[in-house]
Amino acid sequence: MASGLRYPGKVAIVTGGSRGIGEAIVREFVRQGTHVVFCAPEAEGAAGRALEQALRDSGGPGEPHFQPCDVTSERDIQALIAVTRQRYGRIDCLVNNAGRHPPEEQIDDVTSQHFRELLEVNLVGYFLTAKFALPYLRETQGNIINISSLVGIIGQRQAVPYVATKGAVTAMTKAMAVDESRYGVRVNSISPGNIWTPMWAESARQTANPEATIQAGKDAQASALWEKCEGEGFAITQVGEGRG
């Protein structure tokens, strides 16, 4: 294995890995020599397979593998874990990232059904993926990284259900960290901080070098990722890039 890599030969699972923050995490893992099984619903399968092929063609030291998975399906999640074990024989890291941010909506207009559906994606999916991965993470004394959001702490306008799910992710992370510490499994969360609002968009347009601003955000995420993979104990990290 080439020297200087941060996570060589390790095996990671990334949910919601075909685009956005998840895609950036998958790319970083592969760049650092990690075998990554990443997933997205079958509706996004074309994007996931294209990313897998692009990363394989790039000749990076790690190995990507796309697996269709709907995180609201317990059966799909179990298959995701099983495929990872069959291919690589171990699991060192789980990044729970799959989620959805609905459009702005007053609480008066939110139905209980819509709220329950969001909870299934943004919270229950995290819980179930962790539940089924933990027996193998305990074997490797690995780690779980839950992608949360700063809005789970400070709130956000017209987004009560979304904010509730992210606050719950942060609280669940703390509870998991307490329980899993006896097995040597680290459980942490990363909370992207800049929320993509019209005000943020206007600010971005006024930035002299928006590409550099975006890259700085990605670098901050990568730094936070490795802090969680390589560090000890529990921490909530806030980084300044992403929709929130």
Image (tube, grey):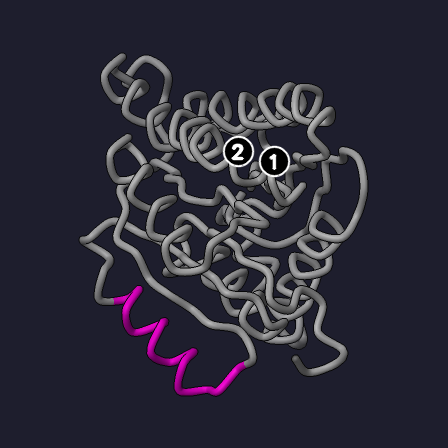
Indicate the position of residue 133 as horizontal and vertical percent values: 47, 37
The quarter of the image holding the N terminus is bottom right
The quarter holding residue 4 reads bottom right
Residue 60 located left or right of residue 179: left
Residue nearer the viewer, 70 or 100 = 70
Label 2 near label 1: C-beta < 8 Å? yes
Q: Is residue 237 magenta?
A: no
* Residue type at tag 1: Arg
The quarter holding residue 185 reads top right
Q: Which residue shows up at 40% across the image and 81% down it?
A: 56
Indicate the position of residue 80 as horizontal and vertical percent values: 34, 46
Give the magenta-colored segment's residue range: 47-60
Q: What SS does tag 1 mark?
A: helix
Residue 5 located left or right of residue 81: right
Q: Quickly name the residue at label 1.
A: 138
Q: Quickly name the residue at label 2.
A: 134
In the image, residue 12 sits, relative to residue 177, either above or below, namely below
Q: Which residue shows up at 54% across the image and 71% down it?
A: 30
